[in-house]
Image (tube, rainbow, N blue to C red):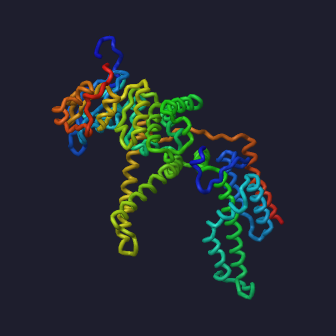
């Protein structure tokens, strides 16, 4: 991946450390590179620093030390507008993400903030909604949709910004199995770099060929998802557990 | 906009009044109310004419009289206040149905009742022909401070979410055997209100985070610019202009 001819990676995090104002240190030098088009799962127990890391990717939190680059552009105050266009974060609760009175306006919010208007804006909204199969709900208010539909619209709100990297926080939480599968189909069909924060290990295995484990503020492992999940000792060491009856060895995933 | 968005006050339909841009309608209602309020109360016939004008608008908007009258009930507290006036206002007394009432009080009551009813009727007409969302767009277009418009639009969006949260808390309380009854339980209800406030506040923080992540810097982008043609303005102006003519007659006659 680091061949000299390789394109600029979507995400480059190097030596990232961060302590909260109250002195609690959450990240101790995180290094992570995600190539363009890759889908990577970010695994780790509660309190490992996953959310803290995600909030660094679009400059909500300022790095104490180290750096973050998105498609080569450093995350700094003067680049924030462009960085936030390039990094699309889908938060866990769609009711937090969808704050406008109608689906259409919500999807239009990001691109409109970036200055898009008129037919161009409309085009973006329609395309983004079509990619998640929600185009006929454009005129609906978000609170009249089902939870799975709201999560899909939440994905569309960031797709409309044509991001370099899509960051999903617990995408499968609270979804029934059908909505879960529909979301997986959508994510697979997108031609975009994905970083997926999740506790749902089978979902990570299904969608992400590569996974990293964040534990105690550092990247503890970075490998093929299946290899990580099959490493019992590693998994136990980082409080990661597979659901009852699930054997990652029994699943055949396409080799990269 | 989808039918799902319909508010209780709104009556779905397609009429020339429904189709007018929201800011024209807002301006027209405001103009009408100002004209009505500045009409001398002695010109009783002028108020009858205003009523006829509103009935005309309702007919064009295809709002049935029953629908309109039911929504006028909101005015009841003011009516009660108006009915008291003939008895409490001092002044020259007169006999009405064998009861002694004051003449200035009667005029005062008439004044409140007539102007209030007309104002409420005009607002009800506006609300039943304009969706909440377009009302907000209209206010935005009329240069209401953007912060107020933002607050109002968040109220529409999160009203249901917060009501739902309240309902879940109530279910959780009752599932543990609590039934609110009597003063002794007010403490529990007060704590619920406090918890709801904190939850809403925290949600506010999360929503803000999501907004900032999508590039929000303090101003909402104008996604739907509502525009009005000269003809639309002229149509909307019909009501206040006719009312103004009646008002001027009321002052001169």
Quadrant where the C terminus of chain A is found in the figure: top left
Q: Residue sitting at 59 percent across and 39 percent down?
A: B224
Residue B229, how many percent across, how many down? 71, 40
Using residue B247 as the reference point, say whether residue B148 is left or right of it.
Answer: left
Rendering quarter of residue B120: bottom right
Up the image or down, A211 lies above or below B170; here it is above
> From the viewer's perspective, is B106 left or right of A124?
right
**Seen in the image, is B25 located left or right of residue A123?**
right
In the displayed structure, A242 sits above or below B145; it is above
Relative height, residue B236 to residue B173 (above, below): above
In the displayed image of the protein, which residue is found farthest to the top? Answer: A5
Q: Is residue B222 visible?
A: no
Position of residue A105 in the picture relative to residue A62 (left or right): right
Query: Percent position (x, y) of residue B198?
Result: 36, 56
In this figure, what is the number of numbered marks? 0
Position in image of residue A193 (x %, y %):
38, 25
Q: Position of residue B130 (x, y in %)?
A: 64, 50
Closer to the camera in the image, B213 or A228: A228
Identity of the residue drawn at 72% across and 45% down: B233
Quadrant of res B232 = top right
Front residue of this view, candidates B70 and B119: B70
Residue at the limit of the structure toward the right, as seen here: B253
């Amino acid at each position: 991946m680091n061949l000299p001819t390789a394109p600029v990676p979507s995400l480059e995090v190097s030596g990232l450390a961060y302590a909260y104002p109250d002195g609690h240190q959450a990240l101790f030098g995180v290094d992570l590179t995600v190539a363009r088009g890759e889908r990577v799962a970010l695994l780790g127990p509660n309190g490992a620093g996953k959310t803290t890391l995600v909030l660094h990717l679009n400059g909500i939190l300022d790095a104490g030390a180290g750096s973050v680059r998105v498609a080569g552009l450093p995350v700094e105050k003067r680049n924030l507008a462009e960085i936030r266009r390039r990094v699309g974060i889908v938060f866990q609760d769609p009711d937090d993400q969808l704050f406008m009175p109608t689906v259409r306006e919500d999807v239009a919010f990001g691109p409109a903030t970036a200055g898009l208007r008129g037919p161009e804006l409309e085009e973006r909204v329609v395309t983004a909604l079509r990619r998640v199969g929600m185009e006929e709900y454009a005129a609906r208010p978000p609170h009249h949709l089902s939870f799975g539909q709201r999560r899909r619209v939440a994905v569309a709100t960031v797709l409309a910004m044509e991001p370099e990297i899509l960051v999903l926080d617990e995408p499968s939480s609270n979804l029934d199995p059908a909505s879960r599968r529909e979301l997986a189909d959508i994510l697979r069909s997108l031609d975009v770099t994905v970083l997926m924060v999740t506790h749902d290990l089978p979902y990570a295995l299904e969608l992400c060929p590569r996974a990293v484990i964040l534990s105690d503020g550092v990247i503890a492992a970075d490998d093929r998802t299946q290899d990580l999940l099959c490493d019992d000792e590693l998994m136990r060491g980082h409080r990661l557990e597979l659901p009852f009856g699930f054997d990652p060895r029994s699943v055949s995933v396409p080799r990269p | 906009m989808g039918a799902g968005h319909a508010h209780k006050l709104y009556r779905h339909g397609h009429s020339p009044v429904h189709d007018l841009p929201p800011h024209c309608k807002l301006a027209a209602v405001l103009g009408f109310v100002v004209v009505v309020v500045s009409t001398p109360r002695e010109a009783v016939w002028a108020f009858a004419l205003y009523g006829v004008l509103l009935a005309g608008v309702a007919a064009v908007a295809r709002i049935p009289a029953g629908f309109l009258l039911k929504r006028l009930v909101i005015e009841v507290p003011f009516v009660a206040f108006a009915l008291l006036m003939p008895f409490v206002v001092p002044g020259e007394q007169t006999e009405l149905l064998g009861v002694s009432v004051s003449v200035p009080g009667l005029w005062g009551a008439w004044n409140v009742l007539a102007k209030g009813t007309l104002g409420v009727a005009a607002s009800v007409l506006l609300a039943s022909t304009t969706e909440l969302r377009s009302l907000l767009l209209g206010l935005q277009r009329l240069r209401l401070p953007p912060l107020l418009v933002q607050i109002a639009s968040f109220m529409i969006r999160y009203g249901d979410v917060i009501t739902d949260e309240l309902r879940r808390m109530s279910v959780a309380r009752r599932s543990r055997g609590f039934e609110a009854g009597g003063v002794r339980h007010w403490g529990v209800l007060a704590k619920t209100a406090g918890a709801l406030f904190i939850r809403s506040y925290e949600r506010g923080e999360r929503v803000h985070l999501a907004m900032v992540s999508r590039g929000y810097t303090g101003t909402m982008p104008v996604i739907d610019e509502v525009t009005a043609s000269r003809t639309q303005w002229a149509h909307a102006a019909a009501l206040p202009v006719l009312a103004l003519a009646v008002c001027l007659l009321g002052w001169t006659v």
